[in-house]
Every structure is written in C-alpha cells, then in structure tokens.
Amino acid sequence: MFKKGTLSHPSAGTHPAHHSSFLYIRNGFVALTLGLFVAAAALAIVKPGSDDGTMPLVHAVRRTLALPEPFPAPAAKFDQPFVNETQIHTGDTLAALLQRLHIQEPGLQKFLTYDKNAHSVHMLMPGRSMQAAVDRDGHLVWLRYNHTPGASAGQHYVAKWLNVEPDGHGGFIAHESNEPATLQVRMAEGTIDSSLYAATDAAGIPDDITQQMTDILGSKIDFIKDLRDGDRFRVIYQSYTHNGAEVGSGRVLALEFINRGHPYEAVWFADQSGHGAYYGFDGRSLKGAFLRTALQFTRISSTFGRRLHPLHRKWAKHEGVDYAAPKGTPIHSTSDGTVEFIGRQNGYGNVIIIRHGKHYSTLYAHQSRFAAGLKRGAKVQQGQLIGYVGATGWATGPHLHYEFRVDGRPVDPLSVKLPIARALEGRQLAAFEHKVALYRQHIRMLAELQRHDIQVASR
C-alpha cells in the first residue's frame, strides 16, 4: 500500500536513511534505477502536458529499499545555505520555534513581535511550518513562516508566507510573499480492508479527492452498503503543490473502482465549448443517471418492503428506504429534475418530490428544513442541495425517507436498474476515445502495480 511522507534535502541537516528505487515507464519500456533520497510518497507524479489534463507517458514510482551499508555523511564544507524546518505544535511560542531552528540572532524575536509587517507570525497555527536558512558561519540568511500553504483562488491555489531577512545594517525587514501553486497530475491505487477513507488515507489521497470519487460513481455504487473488503481503486487526479508539499486538490481526471469484482470507470471529458462531464470508458455520460443515495456515508435503518411501523405498531408496506443520519445532514437530489412538490404532507412531514422526465420521480421526506430559494417548478441538478435531515411527520428520530417511483409506483431504490445516460457520438466520441486511451494506459499501469503488490504480500 502506498504511503505519504516527505523528502529532505541534504542541506537541511538530515541524513537520508534509505535508497529509493525509481521505476520509469516510457512507451511500454521499464528501467529501474536507484536514487539517494528518502523514499516517501508512492504516488506517480506527472507534470501536466497542457491545460486539458493530457500527460506525457513518463512516470516515476518510488519504493523504499533498506541501505546495505551506512550512508556516507555529507562533506563538512558547503557553499549553499543550511536550511532547517520545524512544524508548529499546539502551545508553541515564537521563542520555542526559534530555538528549535537554532536561530540566535540578537533582536530577531523583538522585531517579529513588534514590526507591523510581521503581524502574521503572531498567529502560530498548528500544522504550519517555519523554515530558516543560515550561512556557513551560522548567520541568518532568511526566515520563512508558511502561514497559508494553499489558499483557494478561483479554481487554483496560491501559497502565502511571511519572509524575514537581514537588512544589512544590523536589523531586519519583513514582507508577505505569495505565488501560484504548481499543478501536477498524480496517480494512486489502493485496496479496501476496512473503509474507503482508511484505504485512501493509506494511499496518500486527499479527502477532497475521495469525496469526488464517491460523487462521480454514486450512480453506479452505493458507497454505504456495497463496499467489500478487497475492493480496489485506481485514480488519476490533479494536485496543487508548493515547494514539494501538497496544498490543494483539483479534479479527478480518471477513475476505476473494482466493486465485488465488477469494474466501474469514469473519465473527465470537456467538449469544444469547454463544457465538461464524467463519462464511462465506453463514452456514456455518468451525469443524468441516478445516484444510489441522497446522503453521504450514513446507514440504512429501514429497507423497502413490509415492516412493523415504529409508531403505529402495525404491519404495513414501506415504500422507500430510510437512512439514519444526524439532524441537519445535507440532502442532495439524486438526478436532474424539476421540483413537483415542496411543503408539508401528512406523515411525510416536510417533503420534496422531484420529477425526472416522463417516467421517474423521487421523494425526500421528514426534512427539518429546505434549501434556501427552492420552490415548486424549480430546476435542480444531480447532487444539488435540496434540504436537511430532520424528524418531521411520522418519525421516531432524525432520518431521510427516500422513495424512487416509476410511473408513480414506488420501487426499491436499492435494487432497481437505474436509467442509462446518453452516449457521445461522432466527432465528440472520436476525441473522447483519443483522450481516454492515455488514461487507460495509466490505469493499466496502476493495475499491474497492484497485482505485483498482492503477489509479493502472498509470498
């Protein structure tokens, strides 16, 4: 299983403890070389070839190998600044940080305390980092407080930090700096052995990308009840980095999820107008099909069919599925449609009914409140917030009662075969197939790595 970590430059005073094997793959040929770095991340990292997410067919996958003998110490003489870094912990003071960085510049702490341009250092946020560079004589070259490693700026990320330098006259100057984060394309794979989030954490995948995975394949996989130990996933996604550290996530570009032995794929594709959506590898759109659930990661408290009513204590047909969740949990529309009814309705309490074309409709009951601005006749999109879990109407506790209706007749939403979305045709299909061919190659590479890891683990 791939794991996250950090790389340290020799000038930072840390002695590498491992060799790393780098696996280069170019046009189907594989060569293995050894590099003298700490093997940290096991994600393949690729510089994007263009803004549309296409990638050169060159990847580097790092694995940790133990050194056969002690690694030689670096030369004592060096011309480059010596860089040290420390992480900020809860309760840290500025004096403690400077001490850990081995900085003993007279007047520096007083300057950082009172200079108006250094105000950001007054808020020491746990998890952030501080770096210091000194020359060969131990004098400060620069001090950097990375107070905002990644701030969202539209669809991109910007890194912000405080920079402090000697002014050449025995004092210091401070100024804020920022620069756009670097967009990279990463690949990762993993296997479910307890939960999806545990597996993606072990693979070094950010939570935002995990959430996107569930949103993208929500019409195919019920991530509440369908996951099994041994399910596998391979994902290609955008990542924003600054100075080698990941500061934000972009878009999932391609995804394959093996659930109960069945593969489900998705790839991002934008047409000439710039409008984009996710499609299966066969060119069929995933948008427009129905999501299996309207809530994220909850539990089923009552299934479709006959049951003993919890309030009336009589056996009756239960025409939907109940999802237990805390009050206020967001509810999302499972497909594009039009609000047919919104208001209070007998035992349903606060309920919304959405019409999806001629034959299909969905119902969301017992809501505590509706999303702002929603009214009868309003158009909604798949995944759009429509309300919040509550216990209005005939309910013994907070939950969502969800119904899926075909021609007005309720059917089991957990077992019904969901409608198929439209497929690309003509020139769009040709452009799509050209692009998806690249992603197929990368997904196959990840699959081979998974098979190799499984074989090694079984020995």
Image (cartoon, rainbow, N blue to C red):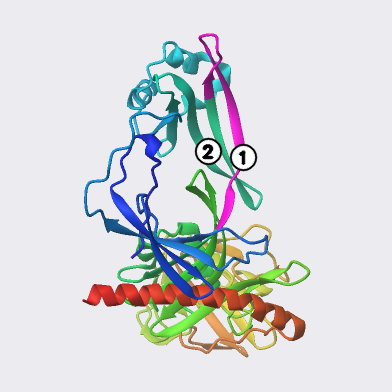
Residue marked by disc 1: 179
Residue 306, image x, y percentages: 39, 88
Q: Which quadrant, please, contains the N terminus?
A: bottom left
Which quarter of the figure has residue 41?
Answer: bottom left
Write down the region rendered in magenta.
Answer: 164-184
Q: Is residue 177 left or right of residue 75?
A: right
Q: Which quadrant, please, contains the C terminus?
A: bottom left
In the image, what residue occupies the spot 48% across and 69% down?
Answer: 25
In the image, what residue occupies the spot 61% across and 87% down?
Answer: 420
In the image, what residue occupies the spot 59% across and 63% down?
Answer: 385
Residue marked by disc 2: 148
Type of the residue with mark 2: Thr
Q: How far apart are labels 1 and 2 at the CA level?
A: 11 Å
Residue 259, image x, y percentages: 41, 80
Residue 146, image x, y percentages: 49, 35
Structural crowding at the residue carrying mark 2, measured as other residues with C-alpha within 10 Å and reported as few (<14), some (14–19) or many (≥20): some
